[in-house]
Amino acid sequence: MTNQEIAKKLVELVGGKENIKAVENCMTRCRLELVDLSKAKIAEIKKAEGTLGVVEAKGQLQVIYGPGKVNKITEEVKKIVGVKIAIGEEAVKATKAKLKEKNDTKFKNILKKLGNIFIPLIPLFVACGLVLAVNNIAGVYFGDAYKTTNAAQIIGLIGNAVFSILPILVGVNASKEFGSQMPMIGGALGGVISSATLANITLFGKALTPGRGGIISVILVVALAVFIEKQCRKFIPDVLDLFVTPLITLTISVLAALFILQPVGGAISDAMGILVSNTIASDNTIVSVLSGAISGGLFLPLVMTGMHQALTPIHADLIANVGYTILLPALAAAGMAQVGATLAVIRKTKNERLKKTAKNGLIPGFLGIGEPLIYGVTLPLGKPFLGACLGAAIGGAVMALFKVGAVALGVSGLPLALLIADGKILVFLIGVLASYAAGYFFTSILGFEDPVE
């Protein structure tokens, strides 16, 4: 059956288009608000072609079709109903109220907001990350001669597509998540924070650094901008709102970013990077191991906020002065531990959608691309993210104990073995296995709340 035929059959089985009040879709489900839920023929819907499952949740009928396909079927349902149905303000409030009944905790709300900012970017993270991994490995095999070719440049351009404008994309998504009525201002703020023009501006006797503070600076300044926007609308007349609110919001937010938020975020990043690099390379074994554990354990939160980018200059300095960076393998243990945590999730979950998402993220995870697993699996579940962090601490400690170093940047995960210095590839692989095992172990012990299908 075509998507149009599946949609037509669904409308018939739920009691006709007159029985549909509203329809929307999430990543996998077509969500139907019905006038009379009893008219829906649930048993027949479950057996219908394309249906992967049916869920009744507090008056709402949710038909599972899977990623991608659900978008197309929902659009066809909307065409049959005859109007472009959108959830209004009252429906949004009602939906949020239902969700808060189960998930209204500060910790879960923070995770939800962070997840919602990055989840739309997961397909791009996967695609670009895989392209970069291929390009970097080819560079290791074929050397500098390959890196200067047009092919390498074009592949690198594709691989960096999302990362080159990541602050802008995060700014837009953060604005939407924080409740802005003009989300594009978040993109503008992300562009300002990452603009190369910042290098020409000197404040307090020091030139500004484009992108300093990473994604965390973007999220902070966007949160401030949305707050200012909401305050402006309390006293600015409607006739002036279109002109005055964006002007005040953008101006104050940019000034706050340049003078306060970006320097603060950058100072935190710089201090952490310097502290870690000086301790993990210490001749004192205890200090080195503890530093490796802390570095590995904290790296996933750094990746989540984008602050890990501040460590790149430190890697480069270590390679220039010592010949290799001892910091990179310890930090790479975080992605490896997340693979172990994901394997534990796959073993324990009974949710087929979650299991499929986790399996799809494993291949990028083995290649050192952690974003799909962070934002698609471990972070939304909560405890597996903590399990991955604890597993990363073990892996980082093992890497630091044996002083495993990398002679170059750009590759993580298993491909990092190609860059290990002093012939310590076997020791590196021991650290990899330790990270996998520890991530799996801690996630199994902590457990998690398995989502309902």
Image (cartoon, rainbow, N blue to C red):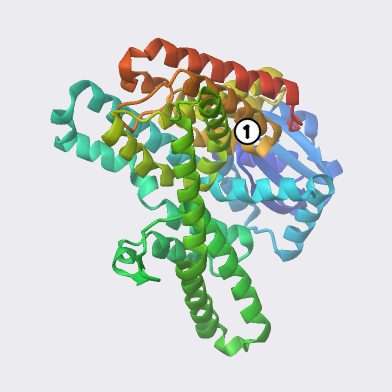
Asked whether residue 306 is in view, the answer is no
> Most extreme residue toward the front, as rendered?
284
Snapshot quadrant of residue 223: bottom right
Judging depth in this view, the residue of 69 and 227 nearest the camera is 227
Instruction: Answer few, some or many: residues within 10 Å of disc 1's Cα (few below 14, many 20 plus, some between 14 and 19).
Output: many
- Is residue 207 rendered to the left or right of residue 413? left
- Is residue 430 rendered to the left or right of residue 388? left
Q: Label 1 sits on what residue type?
A: Thr
Asked whether residue 133 is in view, the answer is yes
Q: How many marks?
A: 1
Q: Position of residue 276 (x, y in %)?
A: 48, 38
Q: Which residue appears at 66% of the width and 86% of the height?
A: 235
Q: Which residue appears at 39% of the width and 46% of the height?
A: 162
Snapshot quadrant of residue 219: bottom right
Mark 1 residue element: helix
- Is residue 123 rendered to the left or right of residue 357? left
Q: Quadrant of the C terminus?
A: top right
Q: Which residue is mark 1?
A: 378
